[in-house]
Image: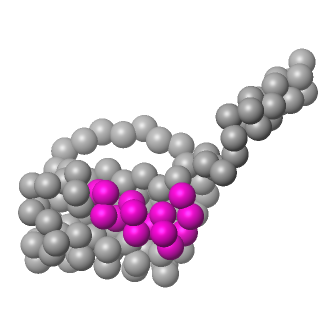
């Protein structure tokens, strides 16, 4: 496990959620090897999906770039020592069927014309 304190670099997440995600990061680091970034990310994503609904994404590593879109209030980027954590929720609602999604897209396109 990494022993350093989590340092938030960017966030728009409520403080309660920030505390929860950092707690989960420490739990994941206790459960998995620091080098197993995929398992660490999966653990955090799974717990956030259970607590706050689906469509969460989690990226964990020491050196990565990103360009994302996210729902307002669901983004945090922090690090613990040299390990970085990017967690966010996108706008997809997985309860929506493919046909419903296509219908919404078609309706939006007609409104834009």
Q: Residue at x 10, y 72 (%)?
A: 1
Colour scheme in the image? one colour
In the rendered view, does 88 fall on the left or right side of 77? right
Q: Residue at x 9, y 55 (%)?
A: 35
Bounds of the magenta segment: 41-54
Q: Is residue 34 magenta?
A: no
Counting from the top left corner in percent of width and height, residue 92 is at 61, 46
Indicate the quadrant where residue 107 lies: top right
Q: Residue at x 32, y 51 (%)?
A: 59
Indicate the quadrant where residue 34 lies: bottom left
In the rendered view, does 37 fall on the left or right side of 7? left
Residue 11 is at least partly visible in this image = no
In the rendered view, does 103 fall on the left or right side of 15? right
Counting from the top left corner in percent of width and height, residue 82 is at 14, 59
Main SS type for the magenta part?
A: helix
Q: How many marks?
A: 0
Pick the front one: 9 or 77: 77
Q: Residue at x 23, y 60 (%)?
A: 40
Counting from the top left corner in percent of width and height, residue 22 is at 33, 74
Q: Residue furthest top?
A: 113
Query: Which quarter of the rendered picture does the C terminus lie within?
Result: top right
Is 63 situated above or below 6?
above
Pick the front one: 86 or 108: 108
Counting from the top left corner in percent of width and height, residue 73 is at 58, 63
Is 27 situated above or below 69?
below
Residue 47 is at least partly visible in this image = yes
């Amino acid at each position: 496990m990494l022993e350093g304190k989590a340092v938030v670099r960017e966030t728009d997440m409520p403080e309660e959620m920030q505390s929860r995600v950092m707690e989960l990061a420490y739990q994941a680091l206790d459960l998995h090897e620091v080098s197993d970034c995929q398992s660490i990310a999966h653990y955090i994503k799974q717990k956030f999906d259970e607590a706050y609904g689906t469509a969460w994404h989690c990226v964990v590593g020491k050196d990565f770039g990103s360009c994302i879109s996210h729902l307002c209030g669901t983004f945090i980027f922090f690090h613990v020592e040299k390990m970085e954590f990017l967690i966010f929720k996108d706008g997809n609602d997985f309860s929506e069927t493919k046909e419903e999604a296509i219908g919404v897209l078609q309706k939006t396109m007609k409104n834009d014309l």
